[in-house]
Image (cartoon, rainbow, N blue to C red):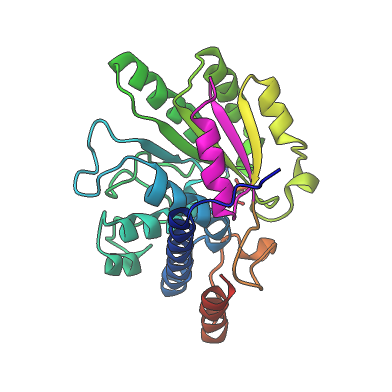
Amino acid sequence: MKQYIGTVQEALDIVHIKEKAKEVRKLIIRMTYEAKSGHPGGSLSAADILTYLYFREMNVDPRNPDWADRDRFVLSKGHASPGLYAVLALKGFFPIDHLMTFRKLGSDLQGHVTRHVPGVDMTAGSLGQGLGNAIGMALAARLDGKSYRVFAMIGDGESNEGSIWEAALSANHWKLSNLIVFLDRNMIQLDGFTESILALGDLEEKFRYFGWATRTIDGHSMEEIAEVLDWAKYQNGPKMIIAKTVKGKGVSFMENNPDYHGKPPPDEKKFEQALKEIEEGF
Ligand SMILES: Cc1ncc(C[n+]2csc(CCOP(=O)(O)OP(=O)(O)O)c2C)c(N)n1
C-alpha cells in the first residue's frame, strides 16, 4: 500500500506553523518572566493547538474581532492566558509589544482571559465554566441560523469539575455538530499529577459513552492536529479531541514538572536557557 506523504505545499505549511508555535512559546516565556508571575506550564502544553487553530483553522478577522460570523474560541482553562494572548498578538489582534504589559496594573492583559482583550470570546478562569458557555454559543449559532463553529479547550485537571460532565451530557443531547473541543491531557493539575489527585482514567472512552465523537492525538504534532480537524468536519454531534501533551513542553526544567504550573523562570539564567531550548529544540 502506498503511504500518503502530502504535497510540497502541505509540507511548507507545516514548517511555517511550527515556526509560529516557536514564536508563541518564546513569548510565553518572555511575558511570564517580565511579569514575574503567570502560568507557563499549561500555556506551553496548549501552544501548538492554539497556534494551529488561529493560523490555519478558524475563520476570524483581527480587524473586526467581534464580527458576528466568526468562529468562536473558548479557553476554558483561562489561566493559560499567556498562550492565547501570544497567539492573538501574532495574528494581529493587538501589537506584540503590548504583551509585555501582561499582569501589570492597568493592562487589559490580566492573568486570566477576559473579554476586554480583542479576540477573546469568553472571560474564563474559574474552572469548569467554559464548556457550558461554548455549548451556549454553539446553540446560539443554530438558533440564529449561522454557520460558525465553536472551538474550546478544557484542562484535564479542570475535568474534575462536575460542571464539565453536566455540559458533556447537554452537548450530546442537542447534537451540537458545530462544537469541537480539545482536552489538554498533560496529566498535571495545579500541584500534582491528575491520576494521583483524582483519577480521570480513559477520557476518550468516557466522552464516547457520553455520546461524543472522539479521538486521541499527539497535541504537539501539527500533522495530527491538521488531520483530526479534517476528521472533525465529517462527524455528527460534538467532537472531543483528547490531546496528549507535555506540561511545560519545550523547556527541559518545566517539562512534566508541577512546580512550573504557575511559576515563570526564576532567574536570568533559567530565562535565557528556556529561550535557547525553545529556539533550538523545535
Ligand atoms: C473553580 C476553580 N478552582 C480552582 C482554581 C485554581 N486553579 C487554577 S489552575 C488549576 C489547575 C488546572 O489544571 P488543568 O485543568 O489540568 O490545567 P493545566 O494543567 O493544563 O494548566 C487550579 C486548580 C480555579 N482557577 N478555578
- Residue 140 relative to residue 155: left or right: left
Membership of 280 in magenta stretch: no
Range shown magenta: 218-244
Q: Residue at x 47, y 47 (%)?
A: 78
Query: Depth check: 135 or 278 in front?
Result: 278
Residue 32 in the image: above or below residue 142? below
Furthest-left residue in view? 63
Dividing the picture into quarters, in which one does residue 246 lie? bottom right
Question: Quick one: quadrant of the N terminus?
Answer: top right
- Residue 237 relative to residue 196: left or right: left
Return the x and y of residue 278 as percentages of the image width and height.
54, 73
Query: Depth check: 33 or 23 in front?
Result: 23
Return the x and y of residue 29 as percentages of the image width and height.
48, 70
Question: Quick one: quadrant of the C terminus?
Answer: bottom right
Dividing the picture into quarters, in which one does residue 121 lie? top left
Is residue 149 shown to the viewer in this render? yes
Membership of 220 in magenta stretch: yes
Furthest-bottom residue in view? 269
Dividing the picture into quarters, in which one does residue 258 lie? bottom right
Query: Depth check: 78 or 144 in front?
Result: 144
Furthest-front residue in view? 1
Residue 56 in the image: above or below residue 141? below
Q: Residue at x 29, y 35 (%)?
A: 70
Number of labelled discs? 0
Q: Residue at x 19, y 48 (%)?
A: 63
- Residue 180 relative to residue 98: left or right: right
Residue 30 in the image: above or below residue 213? below
Return the x and y of residue 215 as percentages of the image width and height.
64, 35
Query: Depth check: 252 or 91 in front?
Result: 91
Is residue 129 shown to the viewer in this render? no
Return the x and y of residue 161 as percentages of the image width and height.
62, 34
